[in-house]
Amino acid sequence: MNKMDRRDFMKLAGLGGVVFASGLGVRALGAGGANGESNTKKGEFYFVQLSDTHWGFDGPSVNPDSQGLLRKAVSAVNSLEEQPDFVVFTGDLTHITEDARLRRDRLAQFRDIVSSLKTTTIHFMAGEHDASLDRCDAFQEFFGKLNYSFDHKGVHFVVIDNVSDPSATVGAAQLNWLQSDLSQLKKDAPLVALTHRPLFDLYPQWDWTTRDGTAVINALMPYKNVTVFYGHIHQEHHFMTGHIAHHAAKSLMFPLPAPGSVPKRAPVPWDASAPYKGLGFRDVEAHVRNAGYQIAELAISKE
């Protein structure tokens, strides 16, 4: 794939839509801003969010290209003339397996594939498929800490672990860490929380919740400019808890139905007439001055 600018990349990838997210809500925008140009300016930046890659999944009726999608996403990101400041993977890097050796093999294979990203800064977090059978021991061997924070060009990021405990709780120790970490910030500082499961009760019957998520949201609530990016539900979804915007990302392996739309949660079968439907990743432009985020939902290309 030849190099291209981000606007051409969005066209090629099949841009599903762009939204502008802020503490005041969500409103639609045209791709690339009012003049069709990149909104990345000096002092601002953009990153790529990929989620739920489920490396190791094998189900031809659900995804006959299960071995190809992650590599295609890496190639697509590498094709950008303007490389993202960093890439973040919001959990379920690999598909669950009870075989401990196979679990490590999958983590190693995933690591080797994404190591070909041109962007050298990659932030990883676990999903329950990576974590639930060994309390994240193998994940931590390959990718390090489960919860941590970092700063980038005026934005503070916190990575919250709501998967290593099989009960889907964050826990008192991590809540104390979060409160201590946030206490160093001004109340109007731009703040982004990254996590796997939703922090609010999206659909608890399908495990689309965090049992003590309200405590996490309460810890975030005093800060005026907070946005949460997460995965787990394998579809685009936007929700507000007070002034806090929550945005779910699509999966790179298989889509899941809308919450409560069917009696049982199960992967949406592959549609040969619309391959890669419901799959994708996203480009997030951070506007530090007004603590806003322009999100471009990107579909998977066949090439």
Image (cartoon, rainbow, N blue to C red):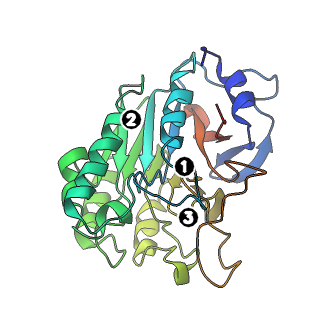
**What amino acid is found at the position of numbered circle 2 in the picture?**
Val
Residue at 56% in and 58% down: 60
Vertical order, 17 against 94 (above or below):
above
**What amino acid is found at the position of numbered circle 3 in the picture?**
Ile
Read off the residue under disc 2. Answer: 114
Residue at 58% in and 52% down: 64
Vertical order, 92 against 75 (above or below):
below
Q: Is residue 150 left or right of residue 61?
A: left
What quarter of the picture does the C terminus occupy?
A: top right
- Report the Cα–Cα distance between label 3 and label 2: 22 Å
Q: Residues within 10 Å of mark 2 (few under 14, many from 20)?
A: some
Q: Is residue 279 left or right of residue 16?
A: left
Residue at 40% in and 44% down: 157
The answer to whether one can see residue 38 in this image is: no
Read off the residue under disc 3. Answer: 233
Residue at 72% in and 52% down: 26
Read off the residue under disc 1. Answer: 252
